[in-house]
Amino acid sequence: MNTTTTSEASGTGRRAGLDREDIVERALDMVEQGGAEALTMRKLAAELAVTTTTIYWHVGDRDALVASVIERAAHRQAELMVEGATARDRVMCVARHVWRSALAHRNVTALAHQVGATSLLELPLEIALTRELDAGGVHGEAARDGLRAILMCVAGFLVVAFRSEGRGTGGQRNQPHALWADVDDDSIASVTLAAMRIPPELDTLFETTVRAVVDSFVPAATVTSH
Amino acid sequence: MNTTTTSEASGTGRRAGLDREDIVERALDMVEQGGAEALTMRKLAAELAVTTTTIYWHVGDRDALVASVIERAAHRQAELMVEGATARDRVMCVARHVWRSALAHRNVTALAHQVGATSLLELPLEIALTRELDAGGVHGEAARDGLRAILMCVAGFLVVAFRSEGRGTGGQRNQPHALWADVDDDSIASVTLAAMRIPPELDTLFETTVRAVVDSFVPAATVTSH
DNA sequence: AGTGCTCTTGCACACTGTTACAGAAACCGG
DNA sequence: CCGGTTTCTGTAACAGTGTGCAAGAGCACT
C-alpha cells in the first residue's frame, strides 16, 4: 500500500496521473450511483482505465478503500445548522439531520452499515449532538446514554427505511405490511389487523418516536428569564 | 426446484434419502455455528455428502434456501411467555423477548437482516406484540405506529449490538467509543467527553429507552378496581 | 551508464452462485 | 423382460468476486 502520509500525485513513477484521492473519489461516485454492490475492485479499475493491482498499490485492501470512501463521505455530510430554542428542539434538529442525510446518501450509509463503520460516517454528527446535549444540561454518562439511545433509535428507523427499498429476497413480499395480509388472529381487533396491512408514515412516526426518546433524556427547558 | 407442496422424501426416484427439510435444517445449523457467510452452497453440499446440484434441485436458489432457513428459525423463537400486570409491562416483556432472542440467535438474525427478511423472522413476535397492544387499549393506526416504533427501536439496538462484535473493517477500531478517543472539542464538558470513551451498558440502556417509547404509545393502566 | 525507487501490468489462485449436460436408479406400462 | 418416464445425482463449466506474486516500465539521482 502507498504509505505516503499525504497524497501528492508524486510524479516519479511510470505514468502517474493517479492519486489515492482520485481513486477514493471515483469509488465514492460508484457507490452513490450504483449502490454498495457496484463497488468492485475490477469495475473501479476499469473506470479508471487501470488494472486492479494498481488500486491495491494505492489504497490497499477493499476494506481500506471502503474506509476511505466513508471518511470522505463523512466530511461532506458534517455540515449542519442547528436550530431551535429549547435544548430538546436543538437535539431533535441534529437527530433529524442524521436521519435526512442518511436517506439522502442512502447508498453510502448502507455501505458503511454493511462493514460496521456507521460510527465512522456519523462521528461528526455524534459530536454535534453531544454538544447540544451538553449545552442542554446533560453531562457525563447521562449524555452518553442519551446520545446512544437517540442514535440507536435513528439507526432502527434507517434499517427499516432501507428495508423498504427493493433489494433482498422476495422483493416486496416480505415487507411487514405484506406479511400481515395472511395473518388472522381472533385476539386482535379487526381495526388493528387492518391497520397493520398498510405501511406507516415513516417521517411523522420518526418525529414522534425520537421526540419521545429525546424528551425522556433531555430535561425540559428550565425557564430562566421571563 | 422440488415443487411438491409438502416434503415427503417422495420415493419414486433414485435413492432419495435427502429431504428438503433435512437440507434446510443443516443449513440452519451452519448459519448458527459459522455465521451467515459460512453458508455456501458447496459447503452445505459437502456437509450433506452430496453435490451442489442436488441442493438446487431440492430447494432452488440460495435466496429460497435462506428464506426457508429463516422461516424455520422463526418458528423456533416464536414461543414466549408474556408476563406483567399492566399493559405497558406486558408490551415491554415482548419487546425484551425480541431483543433477547435476536441476541441468542444472532447469526440467523444477521442473515435475515442481510437479505431484508427480518420481518419474516419476527412476524410471530410482531403478532404477539400487537395482541398486547390491542389488549392494552391501543387499536388501529395507533397500534400500528406503536408497534413499528417499538420494533424500530429494538432494531436499532440490535444493529449496534451486532456492530460491537468482531466482523467489519478495522475490527474494534471504528467502535464509537474508540473513535471518541481522538475527539477534542472545547464546547463539550470534559466529563461528557470522558464518558463517551467507554461503551454504554446496552441492556440497561435498552430497558430505559424502550420503556420510554412504550410509555409514549401505551396509556398508563386505568385503575379499574381498588 | 548504472542503480534505485515508484508506479503499473499480467497472470494466477481460491472462492462464490448458478447452470447445461450427461448419466445412473427406481417405478410403470407393455 | 424390455423400453420409457420420472426422479435424482454427478461433472464440468461460466461469470463473477477479492487478493497476491513476479516482473516490467519509467523517472531521478549518482
Image (cartoon, coloured by chain):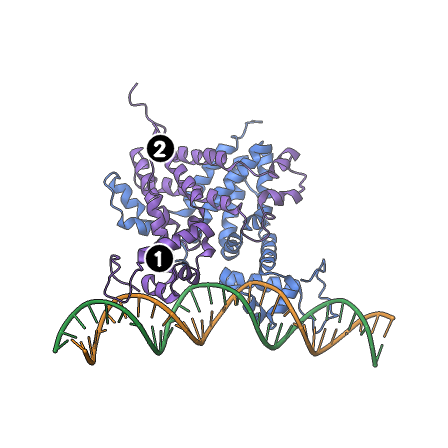
Chain colours: A blue, B purple, C green, D orange
Disc 1 is placed on an element classified as helix
Instruction: In the displayed orientation, state which residue is furthest to the top.
Output: B226
Q: Nearer the viewer, residue A213 or B133?
A: B133
Left or right: A182, with B26 as reference point: left
Labels 2 and 1 positioned on one and the same chain: yes
Q: Is residue B225 above or below residue A83?
A: above
| Residue appearing at x 57%, y 36% in the figure | A144
| Residue appearing at x 66%, y 41% in the figure | B185
Q: Is residue A141 above or below residue A11?
A: above
How many residues crowd around disc 1 within 10 Å: few (fewer than 14), some, or many (20 or more)?
many
Left or right: B59, with C15 as reference point: left
- Any mark on residue B90, and which? 2
Image quadrant where residue B150 sits:
top left
Q: Is residue B223 above or below residue A136?
A: above
| Residue appearing at x 30%, y 36% in the figure | B134
Query: Which quadrant does the C terminus of chain A fall into?
Result: top right
Query: Which quadrant does the N terminus of chain A fall into?
Result: bottom right
Which amino acid type is shown beneath numbered disc 2?
Arg
Left or right: B15, with B117 as reference point: left
Q: Dot 2 falls on which chain?
A: B
Left or right: D27, with D17 as reference point: right
Q: Nearer the viewer, residue A138 or B152?
A: B152
| Residue appearing at x 26%, y 39% in the figure | A188
**Residue B195 in view here:** yes
The tag earlier along the polypeptide, 2 or 1, is 1
Image quadrant where residue A55 sits:
bottom right
Q: Which residue is mark 1?
A: B23
How many residues crowd around disc 2 within 10 Å: few (fewer than 14), some, or many (20 or more)?
many
Q: Position of residue B106 (x, y in %)?
A: 45, 46
Which amino acid type is shown beneath numbered disc 1?
Ile
